[in-house]
Image (spheres, rainbow, N blue to C red):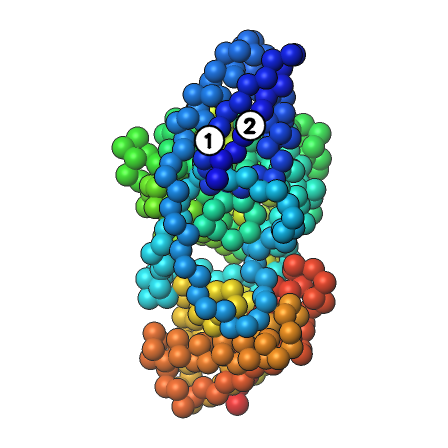
Amino acid sequence: MYIKLTFLLGFTYFSLIAKAQIRITDPGKVAERQVENRANQKVNQTIDKGFDKVEEGIGSIFKKKDKKPKEEPSSGKNEKPDNASNENENTRIAESETVASVSTEKPTLKSYSKFDFIPGEKVVAVEDFSQDAIGDFPAKWNTNSAGEVVTIAGTEGKWLMLGPEGVFYPEFVTKLPENFTLEFNLATTSDFSYYSGFMRTVFAEVTNPAKNFSVWKGFDGDKQRGLELGLHPKDAGGQQGIANFNVFEGPAESIMKNEKSFPAFHVPEHNVVKVSIWRQKSRLRLYVDDFKVWDLPKAFNTTTNYNFIAFSNQGYHVETDRYFISNIRLAVGAPDTRNKLITEGKFSTTGILFDVNSATIKPESYGVLKDIANVFTENPTVKVKVIGHTDSDGDDAGNLVLSKKRSESVKEALAKDFGIDKSRLETDGKGESIPVSPNTTAEGKANNRRVEFIKL
């Protein structure tokens, strides 16, 4: 499919025609925004020179489109994934091929055997951009730059494309307790330049973030306190990704910093990764997919009132480079599996994740399953009933069947991958019949999609 971009300047029109993998609803609207952004960012350049660079850049980023991986058979339930979007079938969608091809090689639960991430106990914020129209900046966010919601071929749901140098933050996050987890998907354009800046995740204490925007060092003047985690898809040789870490106290340079490499994700077959961040009081852990990048015992300042999350783009060396974020999930609390299961007799988790409309367990669930398996190992006489629960999307009967299949999958995983005797595990499913939160919000639905363990 081809996309036609029309730029308006005085009485002159010209067209650029190209293939791409980002699906955009209103090409004319996007083109006009790009012209406006270019004028604001490069006032000392002539319009013609700016357009020449755009034309050259667009020609350089197009890659052959990969075939979309086959989807797994549906269980019959019309379940909405964590990062799915609601798109109008009558919406005009153009395909433009800029981003990442998605790997067709699916990781297994066993491949995540070193992944010990455990998400927070309660989901308090979910952002999948499903409420936002393609081509718009998300309504619940703010920025001092430019960005828009797009789709990426071969992936589910919508993404926020981060524009030129600036800060992008969700206005609905106003408090970060001493125990929380943040998860999100990160993607880049295929030929991302080594000289383009890092994508940084910022945690800070801020009284008025919109008052004094900057790429990071100007937040709230001299009251700036916080830390930032930078990620870049490639190093100078292109063989590794780069991660850096900085802690700031006031307007001075960072008081703690470090840098290290992690497995690259700039290669064409793998431009999408899962980022997981875990805070336990002062301790910080950062994972890219199953690789643990940081495990720092004294990263967070326990006297800082962290109330702000932002994604900061340091700037693109090549105009067609872009970062994309999606499927953001913030959870709070420190799960206490042993105490709740052994002492209280009941443990519930939203950290065992499944493929959409499926009972297949996602590999990033490994840390939670391992934690539960350890309880069985340390308490050899304990027997448990595993109960699956769903949200209210889809029909009741389909949800009930799906919840039962998912509880069986958990039983099989604990037996096969962790050596737990099946005789110690019973299974059941309740579908959508016992919600713990209203099914009226994304956060409520995320909390209702859970697996419960009840001591027998």
Residue flagged by tag 1: what amino acid is it? Answer: Ala
CA distance separating discs 2 and 1: 9 Å
Mark 2 = which residue?
A: 5
Near-viewer residue (253 or 112): 112
Where is residue 87 shown, x and y percent of the image?
Answer: 63, 51
- N-terminal-most mark, 2 or 1: 2
Q: Give me the residue at 51% from left, 73% from top.
A: 75
Local packing at callout 2 (Cα closer than 10 Å; few below 14, some 14-19, many 20+) is: some
Q: Give me the residue at 50% from left, 85% from top.
A: 427
Near-viewer residue (29 or 109): 29
Residue flagged by tag 2: what amino acid is it? Answer: Leu
Where is residue 347 shown, x and y percent of the image?
Answer: 55, 76
Is residue 301 in view? no
Q: Which label number is shown at residue 79? A: none
CB under 8 Å between discs 2 and 1: yes
Near-viewer residue (4 or 173): 4
**Is 410 left, or right, of 160 in this rendering?**
left
Q: Is residue 438 above or below residue 9?
A: below
Mark 1 = which residue?
A: 18
Q: Give me the residue at 36% from left, 54% from top.
A: 104
Where is residue 86 shown, x and y percent of the image?
Answer: 63, 53
Q: Give me the residue at 46% from left, 37% from top.
A: 20
Near-viewer residue (409 or 346): 409
Local packing at callout 1 (Cα closer than 10 Å; few below 14, some 14-19, many 20+) is: some
Q: How many marks?
A: 2
